Structures are given as C-alpha cells and as structure tokens.
Image: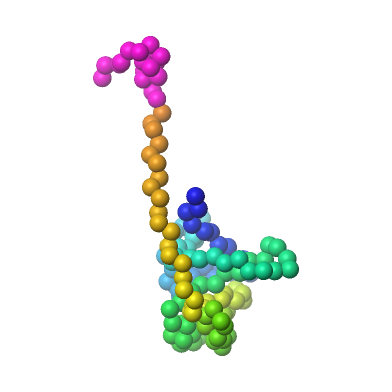
C-alpha cells in the first residue's frame, strides 16, 4: 500500500533552495543526516496526462490564494511569473534561489479525498529459544 510520495527537486544551489523551502515557505522538515533536509508536504494528489514521451514529471505546490502568495513573494523580493488562468487552476511559477522555477497553483478543480490510513498489522515478537523449544516438546517454560 502506498503511504506517501517523495518528490525530488534537482538544483544548481540545493542549500539555497532548501533554505527557501524551510525559511520562506515554512515547510516542516527533518534532518535525514548531514544537514540533508527532507520536507513535509500537505496532502497531495497525482494526475496522469497524455504525452509523446515517458519519464517526464512535474511538481506543483498548491495554494488556496495564489494572489496572496504572489504578493507575499514580491514583499520578500522573490520573483514570480504573472498568474495565468488555466482550466484547472490559477498558476504562477516562483523562481528558486538556485535559478529553477517551481509551479504553484490555486486549484479550480475538486480535490480527491485523502486516503484513509490503514492500520498496520502488529508483528509478532520472534520466538525465544525457550518458547521455540517448548513448542517442539509441548512443554511450557516457567517464568
């Protein structure tokens, strides 16, 4: 069962882009070791679009108010492209410190419900030597 998604943004200045996600967007994060930050994202969705080629993927963050987001970025001196209205949402792109562009949009479509978390079955503790030998002989060990 799928429990989440892990997206990767490749960057020419990964330290600056990690700082942007941490300090500007305020995404929660953990240090996976050596300063390698892994960021938490809000609920996500995935769509499949027709294409003439495979292995082409895009990442967009979603916002509930794209105009407010653009104003917030402008106040911080962060470049965005003008908002464009698409059939599926209001789209902008934010320029990351490393020079890449990150799409952010305000959806105009319905979002799917979040999956219901499934209970993870408990694992049985491995049998100890006493319990394993007791099973073979049919005797119970005293504790």
Which of the 4 image quarters holds residue 58? bottom right
Q: Tell me where residue 3 appears, x and y as whole percent.
A: 47, 54
Q: Answer whether residue 14 is visible to the viewer in this image.
A: no
On screen, residue 122 above or below 34: above
Q: Nearer the viewer, residue 102 or 111?
A: 111
- Bounds of the magenta span? 127-143
On screen, residue 136 above or below 32: above
Residue furthest right as drawn: 52
The residue at the point 49 percent across, 60 percent down is 38
Which of the colour schemes (rainbow, by chain, secondary structure, one colour) is used? rainbow
Q: Tell me where residue 116 appears, x and y as whole percent.
A: 40, 56
Q: Answer whether residue 139 is visible to the viewer in this image.
A: yes
The residue at the point 38 percent across, 39 percent down is 122
On screen, residue 89 above or below 119: below
The residue at the point 52 percent across, 80 percent down is 89
Is residue 126 shown in magenta?
A: no
């Amino acid at each position: 069962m799928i429990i989440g998604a892990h997206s990767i943004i490749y960057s020419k200045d990964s330290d600056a882009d990690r700082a942007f996600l941490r300090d500007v967007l305020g995404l929660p994060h953990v240090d996976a070791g050596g300063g390698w930050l892994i960021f938490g994202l809000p609920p996500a969705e995935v769509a499949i679009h027709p294409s003439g080629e495979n292995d082409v993927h895009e990442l967009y963050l979603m916002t509930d108010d794209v105009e407010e987001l653009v104003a917030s970025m402008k106040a911080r001196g962060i470049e965005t492209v003008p908002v464009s209205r698409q059939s599926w949402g209001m789209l902008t792109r934010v320029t990351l410190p490393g020079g890449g562009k990150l799409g952010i949009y305000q959806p105009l479509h319905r979002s799917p419900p979040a999956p219901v978390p499934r209970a993870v079955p408990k694992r049985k503790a491995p049998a100890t030597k006493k319990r394993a030998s007791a099973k073979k002989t049919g005797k119970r060990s005293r504790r």
